[in-house]
Amino acid sequence: MKQYGYFDDDVREFVITDPATPWPWINYLGCEDFFSLVSNTAGGYCFCKDAKFRRILRYRYNGVPMDSGGRYYYIKDGDSVWNPGWKPCKTPLDRYECRHGMGYTRIIGEKDGLRCEVLFFVPKGGRCEVHRVRLTNTGAAVKRVQLWSFVEWCLWNASTDMENFQRNLSTGEVEVGDRILYHKTEYRERRDHYAFFGANRPFDGFDTDRESFLGPYNGFDTPQQVFAGTSGNSVAHGWSPVASHRFDLTLEAGKSEELIFVLGYVENPPEAKFSAPGIINKAPAEELLEAFGTPAKADAAFAALKGYWDGLLGRFQLESAVPELDRTVNIWNQYQCMVTFFMSRSASYFESGIGRGMGFRDSNQDLAGIVHLIPDRARQRILDIAATQFPDGGCYHQYQPLTKRGNHDIGGGFGDDPLWLIFGTVAYIKETGDFSILEEKVPFDNQPGTEKTLLEHLKISFARVADNLGPHGLPLIGRADWNDCLNLNCFSDNPDESFQTTENKTEGSRAESLMIAGLFVAEGKDFAELLSQPAVSADPAYVDEVREAVSRMETAVKQHGWDGEWFLRAYDYYGRKIGSSENAESKIFIESQGWCGMARIGADEGLCDKALDAASKYLECEYGLVLNAPAFSSYIKDYGEISSYPQGYKENGGIFCHNNPWVIIAEAMAGRADDAWRHYCKISPAFAKDQSLRKVEPYVFCQMVAGAEAAHPGEGKNSWLTGTAAWTWKTVSEFILGIKPQYDGLLVEPCIPQHIGSYRVRRRFREAEYDLTIRLTGKGGSFRIPYRPGFQALEIEL
Ligand code: BGC
Ligand code: NOJ
């Protein structure tokens, strides 16, 4: 089986040894408001705050060849021209290695006795990428070599940058210093920000116009200046502004040269935009270059970044007998949760950064992965999300990170959305004990003067679902529920309209969702528990109302949502069953088994066990549990986008990893450790053997892995930005390892196969530090640890 790389757990890196990975294997840089995507061949782009509106580098999506555009270093050594990351020239290297670590990527290329090592990172406290480039002459003779840098600027709005050429090709503007090249398109008018690419020493030549650097009709692999050993010293006017420095270097045998490049973003106050008419105020760019522009300063910034990640990941560390599990828990799952929290579903190699902002339901779920790491950021996120809610509890489905204003670009009126605010808030308070967030005043739709407390928002969220029930007393689905593609009120026969935004046909609709029903019961119970905490002092009559609504829903599910062997999925517009043995296709769906199972609806009557058995029997395949089976074989107008996908992909029979954890948690709640563990291992990348088949990064969870009915079962897609990250974290930390944050402490309640034996978890919890050794003796049960600040080492037998 061909391998392209391996895990180096001691340094928390994944090491890629062959640049021609089946798909670009990327990493993310940045943990504040400047973010970069960087592939194993240095492809990708960066942006400040908002991938759509503040895009700094241009990227060619779905390009040919794949992964075109990035930060490229070119080396000319005699007649040979190469890049340390192999691309774009693809000159064969004597050695190549890419190490993706926590917030940094290091690429090493070596050829003909010359080694080029580039470390990319985004420092804490700096809106920039730092590139530390070290060239080493490993041979015995002196070498005269040339080095070019190269980036291509995006004209800020990543959407119009790709379409409005009648304007764009006239607007490009730059300025040139002796070390720094500036990109200032549109700065003359309403923008007060510019970008720059600087080096820590004066260059020997430069280019800022793409055509001059590449030559007309050339690609990134054949830049004419590089092959000629020159620079055009071009100043871009319109067309396509780029930035390239050239350095002519002499390297003694065995000696290294180190250059630091800083690719940054600057915002100036309106009154200090210019230093002279039409000339940008460059002082902040010079300061940023100065801040990181020596090897010692770059090293110090890099050490600080490493310290930050060590500190974060140190908050939850596992030692077990299963290295794949330790690797997932200690490194990559937590890391993916952070990235997903920052990006929501906006920018990846599957999400263009243009189409989607921060999702209401997505971002709430993402909180579950990071509340234990960055609780302050979680708090702010909850308040930002709540501020996009409508007074009637409805929600914008997403908001733009730059403005924090909601929009309907990807639809609205999803029946499940409001409940996720309860989910996110409960996760935050259980972790932090910070009940004060409930008292924060939050507006509706960001309108000043409409503020109510967050607790009121939660009540309105709950009521929104409780008061919108269909004929069976089950929640109305609205545009869709968690499954964006189950569009029961859409009825589109026009290929030119989007399933997500086409006007919903809700009048007379009887479409109801069992997924929302399960979510409502689970979150309703959580909400009632929250309201009953002494710190909340809620009106007991209201708490009773919540409990009664939950209990009515349980009854409705048992009466109208049970198909005999599993939970139904939905009732359609006309009140017909979906996900029933009576249906010709898609007789069973995963979401309702997961959510009704987690809500423990009918557990005493054996419904949960039966539903979980059915999930294993009908949905499980070698790579995980598929979403529905058998998948739809043709388009069904009454169901919408779900049936638009070929069988085995995405929401139509794909292994939608996001929802597997729901079943796994339900298995754990039912005490079925072996089933939970088996399902968990199947979707966890660390256990996947075949890197070629899986195709995408071996270190992160996918949103979707092709299911049993697909042409290539096991092929992964949509890596990185997925609710799978937070949900697998919740699953493994709280339900498999069993460390559950509670309002008053930790509850240790593992559900893990006996053969794994004992394990040790070191966990930060508020102001406490726990060192827990858990021995599985077979007796089972749980152990409560009341919260007390300070260090505590405990040996627990269960
Ligand atoms: C995808 C869903 C996604 C939705 C976003 C659909 O095409 O299949 O997974 O949630 O788009 O709007
Ligand atoms: C991806 C979306 O981001 C998420 O909100 C949705 O729940 C799933 N797809 C399922 O459709």
Image (cartoon, rainbow, N blue to C red):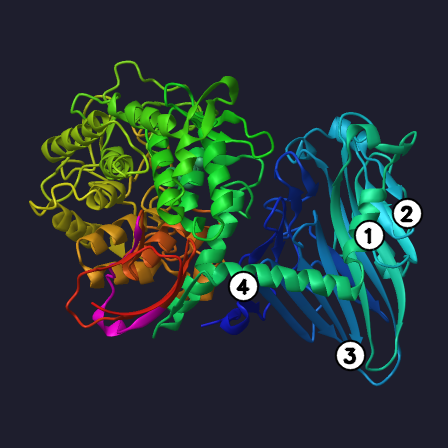
The Cα atoms of the two marked residues, 3 and 2, are separated by 33 Å
Image location of residue 80, percent across then percent down: 81, 69
Question: Mark on residue 113?
Answer: 3
Secondary structure of the residue carrying tag 4 is helix
752 falls in the magenta region:
yes
Q: Which residues are magenta?
A: 744-760
The Cα atoms of the two marked residues, 2 and 1, are separated by 9 Å
Q: Could you classify mark 1 by the number of other residues whose Cα lies within 10 Å: few (under 14), some (14-19), or many (20 or more)?
A: many
Image point 50% across, 32% down: which residue?
384
The Cα atoms of the two marked residues, 1 and 4, are separated by 29 Å
Q: Quick one: 253 or 665, which is closer to the camera?
A: 665
**Badge 4 is on which residue?**
310
608 falls in the magenta region:
no
**Badge 2 is on which residue?**
177
**Badge 1 is on which residue?**
198
Q: Earlier in the sequence, mark 2 or mark 1?
A: 2
| Residue at the extreme bottom | 140
Q: Quick one: 235 or 65, which is closer to the camera?
A: 235
Badge 2 amino acid? Gly
Quarter the C terminus occupies: bottom left
Secondary structure of the residue carrying tag 2 is loop
Determine whether 161 is above or below 699 in the image.
Answer: above
Secondary structure of the residue carrying tag 3 is loop
Badge 3 amino acid? Gly
Q: Nearer the viewer, mark 3 or mark 2?
A: 2
Q: Earlier in the sequence, mark 2 or mark 4?
A: 2
Quarter the N terminus occupies: bottom left
Image location of residue 685, percent across then percent down: 41, 61
Q: Nearer the viewer, mark 3 or mark 1?
A: 1
